[in-house]
Every structure is written in structure tokens, then in C-alpha cells.
Image (cartoon, grey):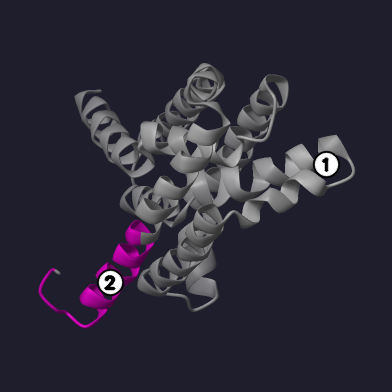
Amino acid sequence: MIDDLNLFASQLVTLWVVLEPLSHLSMFLATTSHLDRQERHKVAAMGTAFAFLILVVFTLLGRMLLEAMGISILAFQISGGIILFYFSMTMIFGAMTRHAVTPDPERRLVHIAVYPIATPIVAGPGAILAMVLFSDNNRGAPLSQHLVTVSVLVLMSLVLFVIFWLGDYIAKVLGEGGASLLRRIMGILLAAFSVNLVLNAFQKWLNLPPI
């Protein structure tokens, strides 16, 4: 029981640091600035649900899938960093506004919930890597440890959903101009984070000292 509690606390802190709910809220608001309150709530619910499913799949099958395809963790980290960098450019230069012209409103919301909310914002390379490593560390462990990992993911998904849901009030304070500025600032920070992911992967691959 004590071991399970220690594992829960350790994984919760790790996933909290990886997901950074407040930073994710900033990106969520920046991405959904053109939506009204009801649409933003729908995207929050669908986005966190889709992200949860993605992370569960990688928790259960991530290492197996990567090994079956001959993909190393470092290669996955580099590719994830490149995808995040591309997404950060769309945040900075405003290419994400293409979602607004989708004819079917419900389909448009699903598109936004899947990309970019579910992935790469929530279920990004950092979160996926964390869940794969959690699962790998639990290999051969009692069932209780696997349940602890899933419960940590459930808790963090609920936290993100609540924060996204309440983010509508913050959006009112920011206004359209503030949301646009926030989107570009977060895009710059996300670009730096994505480059750091790639550099760290190369540093480990080449066995170089930390940058």
C-alpha cells in the first residue's frame, strides 16, 4: 500500500510537470479564441477525452508498437519535437484559423478537439514518452501498480478538463487582442520547447554532456 502511494505521488508529480496545466490552458485559450463559450466547453470535453484515449493506448501498447516498428524512444522524441515545432509556427503565424471555415460546425469542433487540443497540446511527445516509461517501469509489477498509473492519468485528465472548462472566464478578461497576443507568445515558448526536445534526444544519442 505504501509503495503504491509513493508510486502514485511520483508519477503524479512527473505527469503534472510534463503536462503543465497552466501552460496548456494558455495554449487552449489561444487555439480556441475564435469559438464561443459553448463551443469552447465542447472542445474542452472532447479534447481531453481524445487525449486520454491516446495516452491510454500508448500506456498499454506504446513500447510494443515502437519495438514492433523498430522505432527507438530517441527517434520518437525527435519526431515529436519536429511536429511540435511545426505546430508552434502555426500558433505564431496564425495558420490555425483554417478551422473556422469548416462548413459543418460540429465537425469543425471535433477537428479542433483532435488537432491541436488532444494532440499535440495535451497528448504531446512529452506526455506520451512519460506514459510509455511508466508502463515500461511497471513491466512485471503487480496489477496494483498498473492501476496506479491509469488512475494518475485519469486524475490529470480531469484536472485539465476542469481548467479548460474554467478557461472561458479568463478568455473574457483577455479579449480577442489578448488571446491573439497570448497565442503568439505561447507559440514562441513551444518552439523553444520543441527544439529542446530534439537537442536532448541528440545529446543522449551522441552521449554528449547536457546542453
Q: In front: 107, or 56?
A: 107
Residue that lies at the very extreme toward the right in this rendered image: 103
**Which secondary structure, mark 2?**
helix
* Numbered circle sitting on residue 199: 2
Residue corresponding to mark 1 = 107
Q: Main secondary structure of the magenta part?
A: helix
Spot occupied by residue 143 in the image (x, y as percentages of width and height)? 41, 36
- The structure residue drawn at horizontal position 48% and vertical position 19%, both measured from the top left corner, is 173
User: Dot 2 surroundings within 10 Å: few (below 14), some, or many (20 or more)?
Assistant: some
**Which secondary structure, mark 1?**
helix
Spot occupied by residue 137 in the image (x, y as percentages of width and height)? 31, 51
Residue 110 appears in the picture as rendered: yes
- The structure residue drawn at horizontal position 47% and vertical position 23%, both measured from the top left corner, is 163
* The stretch drawn in magenta includes residue 204: yes
Spot occupied by residue 146 in the image (x, y as percentages of width and height)? 41, 38
Q: In front: 200, or 98?
A: 98
Indicate the quadrant where residue 14 lies.
top left
Q: Amino acid at mark 1?
A: Arg
Q: Which residues are magenta?
A: 192-210
Q: Amino acid at mark 2?
A: Leu
User: Dot 1 surroundings within 10 Å: few (below 14), some, or many (20 or more)?
Assistant: few
